[in-house]
Image (cartoon, rainbow, N blue to C red):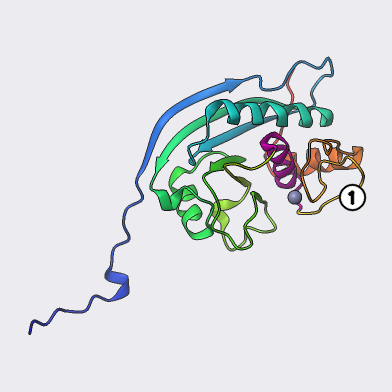
Amino acid sequence: MMLVPALAPTARAAAPLSINIESHQVINDLSRATGIKPAHELTLSVANIGHWDDATLVAALRTAADILAQCRIRIAHAELLRVAVAPKHRDFDTPRSRELARALALPKPTLYFAAGTRQVPAFDAEAIGRGNSRTRPELRDTVWIARGARDPGLVVAHELAHVLMDSGEHDRTPGNLMAEATSPHHTQLTAGQCARISATGVRNGLLQPSVD
Ligand SMILES: [Zn+2]
């Protein structure tokens, strides 16, 4: 019989998180010219960790930019990273997603295009603002979208609005973007919602006043 010294749990080194940035591109002018002068600019960090198709992802960002334009917000540019990570880090899963967000340390707000979710209940997408990130600060001002989410552009706009307003509230006004269920018919934001998005977004450093 051989005696093996027991390892204290703290002595067991965590496996290093392997991250490989496969590509990096900057997409400028996601917002179309509308003839209305934008009041605020938004710069997005976008991490494709779930093998999303680039065209689907960029189309979703453009749709979200079109929707946010009604609040005079322009998505000035998005930094898009394609990130290769181990399968267990490709889904939204609070402890693992915290590790990933801490390691990547991307500017906020950050959109993670994930493979799926391991959260219970399982939502297609989740937004983490200030109010729901106290125990998981790495996830503050991030959005996680599972591949296969229906209407990903609307989902991006809806979740970004949650982050910018720092609110999980929904709105039952017909056609409102902040309806509980996203739909192509739910695209409108009220003047009050736009005001809150702008004020809170600026206060939290997520929106910059437009310079031109
Ligand atoms: Zn929502």
Instruction: Look at 54% across and 49% down and name the residue there.
Output: 116
How many marks do you count on the picture? Answer: 1
> Is residue 136 visible from the viewing direction of this image?
yes
* Quarter of the figure with the N terminus: bottom left
> Is 154 inside the magenta-drawn segment?
yes
Outermost residue on the left side: it is 1
Percent coordinates x, y for residue 96 in the rendering: 46, 56
Q: Three-letter amino acid code at disc 1? A: Arg
Instruction: Look at 69% across and 34% down and name the residue there.
Output: 153
Image position of 23 (left or right of 93): left
Q: Which residue is under mark 1?
A: 172
Per the rendered image, the range of residues in magenta is 151-167
Where, by quadrant of the figure, is residue 12 drawn? bottom left
Percent coordinates x, y for residue 22 in the rendering: 39, 31
> Is residue 166 visible from the viewing direction of this image?
no
Q: Main secondary structure of the magenta part?
A: helix
50 in relation to 28, above or below: below
Image position of 20 (left or right of 25): left
Q: Secondary structure at mark 1?
A: loop
Where, by quadrant of the figure, is residue 60 drawn? top right
Percent coordinates x, y for residue 102 in the rendering: 47, 50
In the foreground, 31 or 89: 89
In the foreground, 40 or 13: 13
- Does the beta carbon at disc 1 come under 8 Å from ligand 1? no
Outermost residue on the bottom side: it is 1
